[in-house]
């Protein structure tokens, strides 16, 4: 059975690159009817944050990527890690190193002066003498001293590194706390992971983890190291570009399905297809198809996808989704008309909420530039005549087409271009030269409110 995981550290929010890695892992598990596990790597007690941990779990809940089983916390497994450290010490596969920080610093300076790679020189590897006083030892694992450490990376292909490139690295610090590469290898093995999908910033941790796997006799999983997401200029993604808290995307009015669709295409493709439902992603995703090269974040693409998903939501779904953005229209008698008039114009839920507010809230002031352009010449008399027509129209005014007929009548009667009524009417109703179709807006407002707004505007025209 395929088992994958996502293993964030709760030292900050879950950002977009982390969510993409999690998505690739989740899809791999789901595609194979396997398990997707969540592990919180919270061994760094000084930097851990309960708030960050909660934010990570909230982000998963929002995008709907459920994990299997309980969340595993590394901070609760120190006794287990100690057991494996003791086992390696007993088997002679690890040893206590009494090298002081000063000695290590001196060794590094000496190696740098000789233009050698800085590395531990193994001086305590086979030490049998009396330990120096006053030094709390670290525990180092015995790395192989010859041959190659090789593995097949599902994205990058065959990877080989000379064993001499990996020194006897520390697996437990002087205070007994285990190190990252040691606990990751143990947890991945005990969680029965078959596939480890992670960012390629972890590529050079893999040989060290393989040393741990081999020392403890664990099976080695398949590795997939995913290239980073760059900004639109091809440089490292920064907070300004979009490497922000996943939950900020919710606050900005993005739909989770749009965000996941956007992320799956950053480094993976299926022909020329751009729009994928969750079900299609699960059916089609194969980690072997992940691109080798980095992908570029493109905000326009995300907005385009989000607009697509908004347009394809039912109006009742949108009414619910808009509530956190200060728009509660679930009981509005013109709900369908209101959303039909606005959802083509909102690329995000925030923009959609703004469009709805624009219609439902009578303007308290008029955009100076727009009113100067719209309220000139005959505008006042045209608006007054339009009011008269609305009040005396001989058919019921309910639908946008009904109001459109009134607009056509005034254009015909006054022998004017459509703009002569359209511009002053728009500014009268909305306060600016923006928004949905005028016939739709008036149908939503009804005759009384439409007349009231025009009369208020007329009063401001000199």
Image: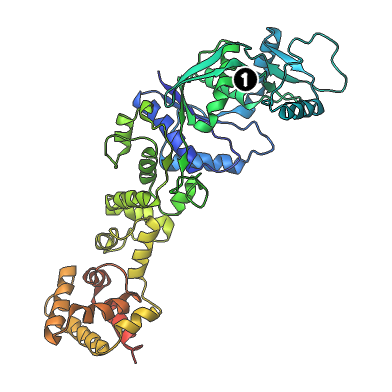
* Location of residue 121 (image quadrant): top right
Q: Give the position of the N terminus as an image quadrant.
A: top left
Answer with left or right where residue 420 lies relative to residue 408.
right
Answer with left or right where residue 376 lies relative to residue 60.
left
Residue at (38% x, 31% y) in the render: 290
Location of residue 247 with respect to 76 vertically, above or below: below
Answer with left or right where residue 130 lies relative to residue 23.
right
Q: Locate residue 204, reporting x and y percent.
A: 56, 26
Using the rendered image of the protein, determine whether residue 90 is visible from the camera's viewpoint. yes
Answer with left or right where residue 46 lies relative to residue 209.
right
Residue extending furthest toward the right: 133
Number of marks present in the image shown: 1
Q: Give the position of the C terminus as an image quadrant.
A: bottom left
Task: Say which of 296 and 110 sits in front.
Answer: 110
Residue at (76% x, 15% y) in the render: 123
As helix, strand or loop, the secondary structure at mark 1 comes to loop
* Location of residue 165 (image quadrant): top right
Q: Locate residue 120, reporting x and y percent.
A: 71, 21
Assess disc 1: are there few (<14), some (14-19) or many (≥20) residues with their C-alpha within 10 Å of its C-alpha.
many
Using the rendered image of the protein, determine whether residue 393 is visible from the camera's viewpoint. no
Q: Locate residue 443, reporting x and y percent.
A: 23, 70
Q: Locate residue 406, reporting x and y percent.
A: 15, 78
Task: Say which of 64 and 9 sits in front.
Answer: 9
Here the colouring is: rainbow
Residue extending furthest toward the front: 114
Location of residue 164 with respect to 344 vertically, above or below: above
Residue for badge 1: 166
Task: Say which of 208 and 62 sits in front.
Answer: 208
């Amino acid at each position: 059975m395929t088992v994958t995981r996502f293993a964030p550290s709760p030292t900050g929010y879950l950002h977009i690159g982390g969510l993409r890695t999690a998505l690739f892992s989740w899809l791999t598990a789901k595609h194979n009817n396997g398990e997707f596990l969540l592990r919180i790597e919270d061994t760094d007690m000084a930097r851990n944050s309960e708030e960050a941990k909660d934010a990570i779990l909230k982000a998963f809940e929002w995008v709907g990527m459920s994990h299997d089983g309980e969340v595993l916390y590394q901070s609760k497994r120190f006794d287990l890690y100690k057991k494996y450290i003791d086992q390696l010490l007993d088997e002679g596969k690890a040893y206590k190193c009494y090298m002081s920080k000063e000695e290590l610093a001196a060794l590094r300076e000496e190696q740098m002066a000789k233009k050698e790679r800085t590395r531990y020189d193994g001086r305590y590897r086979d030490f049998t003498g009396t330990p120096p006083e006053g030094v709390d030892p670290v525990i180092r694992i015995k790395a192989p001293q010859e041959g190659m450490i090789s593995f097949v990376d599902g994205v990058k292909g065959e990877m080989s590194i000379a064993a001499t490139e990996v020194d006897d690295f520390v697996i437990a610090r002087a205070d007994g706390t285990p190190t990252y590469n040691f606990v990751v290898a143990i947890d991945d093995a005990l969680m029965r992971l078959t596939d480890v999908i992670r960012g390629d910033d972890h590529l050079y941790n893999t040989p060290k983890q393989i040393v741990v796997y081999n020392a403890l006799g664990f099976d080695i999983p398949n590795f997939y190291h995913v290239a980073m997401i760059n900004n639109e200029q091809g440089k490292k993604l920064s907070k300004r570009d979009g490497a922000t808290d996943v939950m900020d995307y919710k606050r900005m009015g993005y739909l989770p399905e749009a965000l996941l669709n956007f992320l799956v295409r950053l480094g993976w493709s299926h022909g020329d297809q751009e729009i994928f439902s969750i079900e299609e992603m699960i059916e089609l995703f194969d980690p072997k198809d992940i691109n080798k090269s980095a992908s570029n974040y493109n905000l326009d693409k995300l907005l385009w996808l989000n607009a697509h998903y908004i347009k394809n939501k039912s109006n009742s779904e949108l009414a619910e989704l808009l509530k956190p953005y200060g728009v509660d229209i679930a009981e509005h008698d013109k709900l369908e008309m209101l959303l039909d008039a606005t959802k083509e114009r909102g690329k995000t839920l925030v923009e959609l909420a703004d469009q709805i507010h624009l219609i439902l809230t009578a303007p308290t002031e008029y955009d100076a530039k727009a009113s100067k352009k719209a309220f000139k010449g005959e505008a006042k008399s045209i608006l007054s005549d339009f009011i008269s027509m609305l009040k005396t129209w001989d058919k019921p005014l309910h639908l946008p087409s009904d109001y459109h007929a009134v607009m056509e009548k005034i254009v015909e009667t006054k022998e004017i271009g459509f703009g002569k009524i359209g511009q002053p009417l728009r500014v009268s109703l909305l306060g600016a030269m923006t928004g949905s179709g005028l016939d739709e807006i008036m149908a939503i407002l009804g005759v009384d409110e439409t007349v009231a707004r025009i009369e208020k505007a007329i009063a401001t025209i000199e």
